[in-house]
Amino acid sequence: MSQSPRGGSASKDSKYDLSKISARVDRVNVSGLQRTQNDYVMRAADGLFKANNFQDLMVEAMSTKSYLHELGIFKDVSVHIDISRGADATPQGYEVTFKGNEYTRLMGSAGTEIGQNEGSLRTELTIPNILGRGESVSLQGSYSSNRAHDLQLKFWKPFFHTRFRENRPELSFSLFRQTDRYDISSFQTTNLGYLVDFSAHTMLGVDLTHSLQYENSIRDVSLLNKSVPFAIRDHCGPKLASLLRYSVTFDNRDSNVFPTHGVLLRSVNEYCGLGGNIAYTSSTAHGEVNVPLFAGLVAQFCGRVGVVKETKNTTQLPINSLFYCGGPLTLRGFKFGGAGPVIDGTPIGAQTFWCTGAHLWAPLPFAGVFKNLASHFRMHFFYNLGNSNTFSTENMRSAFGVGLAVKLAERARIELNYCVPVRRQTSDNAINGFQFGIGYEFV
């Protein structure tokens, strides 16, 4: 025997149209608050009090549960819906209780992190919700034997509990030390400074993610060996950079790794020269379009473009702000930086670059037999085009091939491709054969 939402009985096979069952919320309780201030969770109930049937009530309850998770104060949240009781109870009234389990005062984690063609070991210590309204402090460190390692102390404050809840605004302040190695050009940069970041979403027709940052840092360029061309040596030494960075992202894909439909558009713009002795403007844009075909086939078209320009205050464009074209994430069939300008046999980066890619993605044969395992694998046929220091197609580079990709937890993927360069320059470092790549954004 099953029970109706208001206590009536029905046969075992009965089904209810919950949208036709009148309901209203008389009271909402949030329990488990220890360090959290009451006003930080008050807006969680806004949608529940608008429900006028049981289906809306359940949908809004799940939405409120997700909202409480977004506040960053609970490890887990459970929902309990009961008939309203007491002197203030209405005939169709319900009482909704959310029971939360707050994070401990100190949390730690260690694990691996996927970067652009590199993996790193990451550790983090976090003190969550220190002031009772979502404010948190974290100390993060990562190390990669391949290219980079960094240390960061970050404080952030979300404003999800304000009337701008739908925009999910967040403010953060970071102190950082970051080291990047450019083995292909025999130099490394060490950046020491601070970063202020404000991020938010806007939903005026389309959902856009915005980030506005101010960075002030000392950038120190040093050599990795003695046999380095003078054009690179000339950039050595510490310099002060003061810059504004604005990025905007539109993403309606159904998956980050193996999307079957949707579009990704991202733009990052920098202006450096608000102080210090480095001055330049930089713009990069990345786009991706996915079109479903038939029998699990997906056509994908990608493109990326970047420009670094001098300003009236520029004395020398910083070498670590130039673009390196080539590699498994941009122009397959070439080594990282292997499709750009070279001085004395050493790649030095380009002021402009562009690259495009056309892919045909397909599931593995017999994917229907091993559904769970096969969902993590895809085959693709690709054709890449690109060039450096010019936007013309004259002397452009190109390559085609076939490869196997493996999904890593909806965040990144591994590619093993067999590449055949078609067009190349005499100074290029091309790969005719297998090429391995790992990352979260490919062309």
Image: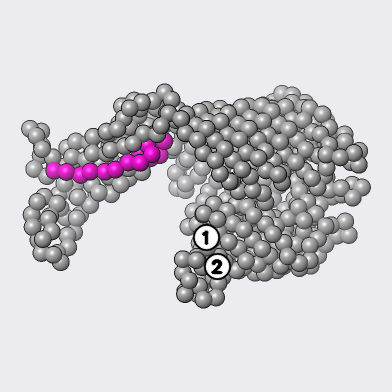
Instruction: Check disc 2 and give the amino acid type.
Output: Val
At 77% from the left edge and 43% from the top edge, which residue is drawn?
Answer: 182
- Residue at 8% of width from left, 54% of height from top? 8
Q: How is the image coloured?
A: one colour
Q: Residue at left 50%, top 28%? A: 137
Rendered view: 396 above or below 121: below
In this rendering, position of residue 284 left or right of residue 89: right
Q: Determine whether the residue tagged by mark 1 lies in a helix, strand or loop.
A: loop
Q: Closer to the N terminus: mark 1 or mark 2?
A: 1
Residue 270 pos. (x, y %): 67, 36
Q: Judge from the rendering whether residue 376 lies leftward or rightward of residue 203; answer left or right.
A: right
- Is mark 1 in CB contact (under 8 Å) with mark 2? yes
User: In the rendered structure, which segment of residues is drawn in magenta?
Assistant: 68-83
The location of residue 141, given as percent across then percent down, is: 61, 35
Which label is found at residue 138?
none
Q: Answer whether residue 76 is magenta in the image.
A: yes
Q: How far apart are marks 1 and 2 (CA)?
A: 8 Å
Q: Is mark 2 on a helix, strand or loop?
A: strand
Q: Which amino acid does label 1 sit on?
A: Pro
Report the disc number at residue 298.
2
The residue that mark 1 highlights is 259
The answer to whether residue 412 shows anywhere in this view is: yes
Give the percent coordinates (x, y) of residue 361. 58, 68
How many numbered tags mark residues here? Answer: 2
Using the rendered view, name the quadrant where residue 27 is placed. Answer: top left
